[in-house]
Image: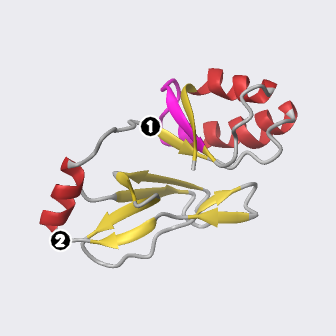
Amino acid sequence: MLSDYQTIDPKRNLSVKYENLYVIDGQITYLSLVNVELPFVNKCLNAYGWKPHIRIVTPTEAESIHNCVDEEIPLCLLNDNLWYGNIGHALWDGIYPIYQAAAKFGYFDDDFTYLTSEMDNQNALSYNAIKTFCGGEILNH
């Protein structure tokens, strides 16, 4: 399957929904038949952005890659959770923006995987709050 995306708030690209992304060689990868300019996902209150690595493939390569998938995650939300040791930052900078983005795309009650960076202190109160809120697992990228 080829990757795709949709934006809401297109003037600022605040919310981006990527579909069919793959982890290839440790990178989150967007599969496309042609080169495409992907929108940035704004992270950390718009201080910087992220977008997936692009891999241009043939339809046969895309199908081959898709057939090798070990695990599929139905809904995964990406956010950097800087200062997550502070429960206020975890709730306001972590949970609130991803919930707002998810709601814009109609995901109000869906459990999701929380994809973030460097959130490995499972003893922090905010770790448990985010884990409870997302209903899925927390993955570090």
Image x and y of residue 80, in percent: 69, 49
Circle 2 packing at 10 Å, graded few (<14), some (14-19), many (20+), is some
Q: Is residue 34 left or right of residue 11?
A: left
Q: Residue at x 44, y 37 (%)?
A: 75
Number of numbered callouts drawn: 2
Instruction: Identify the residue at horizontal 64%, vertical 59% (top origin).
Output: 42
Magenta-colored span:
102-115
Q: Nearer the viewer, mark 1 or mark 2?
A: 2
Task: Tell me which corner region of the image, top left, top right, bottom left or bottom right, holds residue 4.
Answer: bottom left
The quadrant holding residue 37 is bottom left
Q: Is residue 104 visible?
A: no
Q: Position of residue 28 (x, y in %)?
A: 45, 58
Which part of the image, by quadrant, shows the N terminus?
Answer: bottom left
Q: Amino acid at mark 2?
A: Thr
Q: Secondary structure at mark 1?
A: loop
Find residue 31 and report its horizontal and vertical position in percent.
Answer: 31, 64
Q: Foreground: 40 or 115?
A: 115
